[in-house]
Amino acid sequence: MPGVDVKLVLRSTRVVTPEGIRAAAVCVAGGEIEAVLPYDVVVPAGARLVDVGDDVVMPGLVDTHVHVNDPGRTEWEGFWTATRAAAAGGVTTLLDMP
């Protein structure tokens, strides 16, 4: 385990890494990913363990081509609904096209 104060360990059988998808434990300290370790790592005392089973843990996605209708047509889709829909699908950043 890294030598920092890990506050959260997020565990999944499907973690997306540069090497591919594998079972792993993602250790978070200070709001940042500190390490990606083997799935069965011993969770340090005081750290919260969240085991998401087979749910995929992956980096946030960036959508570089979004047409958010704000201003105008916000009753159909505005920033409020577009950003929530994006987040539900794993998108962390939207780049609105004019």
Image: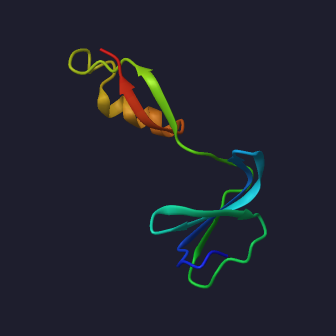
Which quarter of the figure has residue 77?
A: top left
Task: Tell me where residue 16 appears, x and y as whole percent.
Answer: 69, 46
> How far across and down, in percent of the image, does residue 37 sit?
72, 64
Residue 10 placement, left or right of 30: right
- Identified at 30% across, 25% down, the residue is 78
93 or 72, which lies in front? 93
Name the foreground residue: 4 vs 87.
4
Q: Is residue 91 above or below residue 48?
A: above
Above or below — where is 34 with respect to 48? above
* Residue 93 left/right relative to 49: left
The structure residue drawn at horizontal position 75% and vertical position 72%, both measured from the top left corner, is 41
When asked about the image quadrant of residue 45, the answer is bottom right
Q: In this rendering, would 75 be left or right of 51?
A: left
> Which residue is situated farthest in the left direction here?
71
Residue nearer the viewer, 48 or 92: 92
Q: State the image coordinates of residue 65 (x, y, percent, origin top left).
A: 43, 19
